[in-house]
Amino acid sequence: MRTYEVRTFGCQMNVHDSEHLRGELEAAGYREAADGTEADVVVLNTCAVRENASNRLYGTLGQLASQKEQHEGMQIAVGGCLAQKDRSHILDRAPWVDVVFGTHNMGALPALLDRARHNKEAQVEIRESLEMFPSVLPSKRESLSSGWVSISVGCNNTCTFCIVPSLRGKERDRRPGDVLNEVQALVEQGVVEVTLLGQNVNSYGVATGDRQAFSHLLLAAAEIPGLRRLRFTSPHPAMFTDDVIDAMASSPVIMPQLHMPLQSGSDRVLRSMRRSYRMRRYFGILDRVRERIPNAAVTTDLIVGFPGETEEDFQATLDAVRRARFASAFTFEYSKRPGTPAADMPDQVPHEVVTERYGRLKEVQDQISLEENQKLVGTTAEVLVTDTAGRKDRETHRHSGRAQDNRLVHFSVPAGAEEPRPGDLVTVPITHAAPFHLLADPVPGEYRLERTPAGDLWAESTAPDAPAAVSLGMPTLRRPAAARP
């Protein structure tokens, strides 16, 4: 039996795709390589959004070349967005690669690996359009307690810095019944937290004229018995409507967390980016979210140094960050991507200027993150456990998990209290804050533990007599019930 390893670069969509790649390989008879061992097949699931993604790929391929020379029969496969973009050029730079496949044909990976071995030559298969939703493919999930569910694929926007639409194709929505069936199936497998995924998740249903389809889907999913937490990412500010805020505020299952990409605080730069909203609209959304959901944690994406960005534009971004009070921000230095309109724009900002601005922005946001976290000291948080004691903090033996607002919490267990398992829920008091995490060190009586099906599955999978591998395949989707949208 041949072994495999899947390495993921990029966003949550790539992470979810990698779960399907693992499922496809498992269904074809491969098994995942044990930690510390060399796999017979290494799959690199790539991202193409930023320049360093390309550098990381070819750096990794260089390291794998020498490994392959010493490992008879080893195969290397490259898939994902960068494979869709670079295609056969990957073989020009790394001729030791065996398979190159795109974002639209993940299900072909096992067959391409077999063909490459049989023919003793590299196989390149890049399809130009999606033939089936990836969600129908088998899946091997990384987590027993949390799962991703794609509600759409592709993107219809034309942001000048982004190459994703040309790689993932036009936006296509899944049927609501299929989405709800998949959520139901995950809950039946013990999952307590589901995240709905889409390139612009809140544009769901817009193509058919139903601008409230996304909020209806949220509310329908939140009613599935056994589902404890429902999240979604990432919405687009231009299409964000108040009915989504109403849905979030009305259901305790929909978590008080909102990732709302901003990119720039300058209307002039937003216009150049072809981001179809302006700061007035953006702040209007944030104000209404915080009015209805005061405990919501809002996070964002920011790009520094977009072509033509002046110091005045950058100051507008700093001002926006100070006003928005984001819980955290994914901040990126602008990266020129060939094939995007921004790559050919005049007034490219010098790298040293971009780096200096990035440092200033990070300093401001880190301070805000600390201050916002400090406001939570003295409150209690319900935490979904993700790591067992000792993995994150060997000295204090704290466990780790995510609060309802998705903040990272490291917590200890009082002496004599029952230890949690990954997938369990604990309620603890927040005792200390840092910019990127919270600490909770409860005394006896301040710690409450709730066992979950996911925790039971984890205990079974780690028992001494447990099988070497646990199958987490996706059951066949049922036909949508008539009562479902």
Image: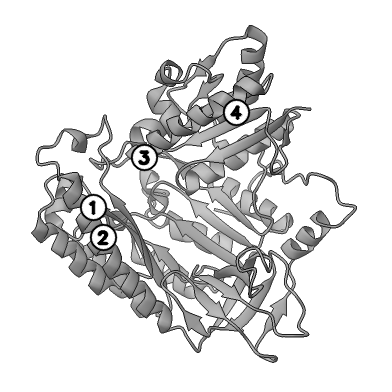
Q: Which mark is residue 163?
A: none
- Check disc 4 and report its element: helix, strand or loop: helix
Q: Which residue is mark 2?
A: 359
**1 and 3 marks in contact (CB < 8 Å):** no
Mark-to-mark CA distance, 1 and 3: 15 Å
Q: Earlier in the sequence, mark 2 or mark 3?
A: 3
Under mark 3, the amino acid is: Asn
Which quadrant of the figure contains the N terminus?
Answer: top right
Is residue 47 depicted above or below 106 in this figure?
Answer: below
- Check if mark 3's residue and mark 4's residue have beta carbons within 8 Å: no
* Mark with earlier residue (3, 4): 3
Q: CA distance from mark 2 to mark 4?
A: 42 Å
N-term-proximal mark, 1 vs 3: 3
The local secondary structure at tag 3 comes to helix
Q: Earlier in the sequence, mark 2 or mark 4?
A: 4
Cβ–Cβ under 8 Å for marks 2 and 1: yes
Q: Circle 1 sits on which residue?
A: 355
**SS at mark 1?**
helix
Q: What residue type is disc 1 on?
A: Thr
Residue 52 is labelled as 3
Question: Is the residue under label 3 in contact with that under label 2 (CB below 8 Å)?
Answer: no
Pointers 2 and 4 in contact (C-beta within 8 Å): no
